C-alpha cells in the first residue's frame, strides 16, 4: 500500500529504524495530544509524498515508553529524522508540512 505510515514499537525500533537502508522519519505522539492529532494528517501526506524514498513511522509514546525514554522524548509531538540508523534532526512541536519538507530535504537530501 503506497504511502503507509508504519507503527513502530519498542520491539521493532531497531529493525525498522536502526537497520533501515533508507532514511526514516519518526513521529512521537499520543492519542490524548491535540497537536499530535493535528500533525497526523501531515505525517500521512509525507508518507505518500516520499513513498519509497523515506520510511515514515509513528511511535505512540504511551504504549512504547522504552524507545521514547532512550531517545529522550520530553515533549510531543516530536519528529526525529534518521539516516543510516543515526538521528540527524529533532523537531519539537507542530510544524507545517512545507517546513517539514524543507528540513527533510536539507537534513536527509530526500526530495519528492
Image (tube, rainbow, N blue to C red):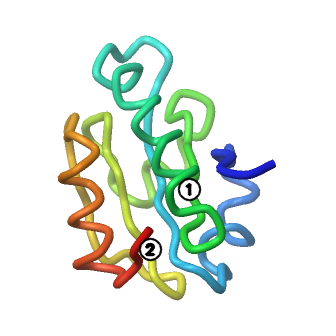
Q: Quadrant of the C terminus?
A: bottom left
Does 2 sit above or below residue 18? above
Does 97 sit above or below residue 70? above
**Image coords of residue 29 (percent x, y):** 44, 33
Q: Is residue 23 shown left or right of residue 32? A: right
Q: Is residue 101 shown left or right of residue 18? A: left
Does 84 sit above or below residue 105? below
Residue drawn at point x = 22 percent, y = 34 percent: 94
Label annotation for residue 74: none
Q: Which quadrant of the figure has residue 37?
A: top left
Residue drawn at point x = 74 percent, y = 58 percent: 12
**Image coords of residue 3 (percent x, y):** 65, 50
Mark 2 lies on a secondary structure that is: strand
Q: Which residue is mark 1?
A: 56
Mark 1 lies on a secondary structure that is: strand
Q: Which residue is mark 2?
A: 82
**Image coords of residue 86 (percent x, y):** 44, 82
Q: Which quadrant of the figure has residue 59?
A: top right
Amino acid at each position: 500500500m503506497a504511502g503507509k505510515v508504519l507503527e513502530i514499537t519498542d520491539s521493532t525500533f531497531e529493525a525498522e529504524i536502526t537497520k533501515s537502508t533508507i532514511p526514516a522519519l519518526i513521529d512521537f505522539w499520543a492519542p490524548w495530544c491535540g497537536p499530535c492529532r493535528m500533525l497526523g494528517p501531515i505525517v500521512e501526506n509525507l508518507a505518500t509524498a516520499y513513498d519509497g524514498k523515506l520510511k515514515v513511522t509513528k511511535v505512540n509514546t504511551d504504549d512504547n515508553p522504552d524507545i521514547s525514554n532512550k531517545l529522550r522524548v520530553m515533549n510531543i509531538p516530536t519528529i526525529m529524522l534518521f539516516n543510516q540508523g543515526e538521528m540527524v534532526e529533532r523537531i519539537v512541536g507542530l510544524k507545517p508540512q512545507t517546513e517539514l519538507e524543507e528540513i527533510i530535504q536539507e537534513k536527509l537530501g530526500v526530495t519528492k
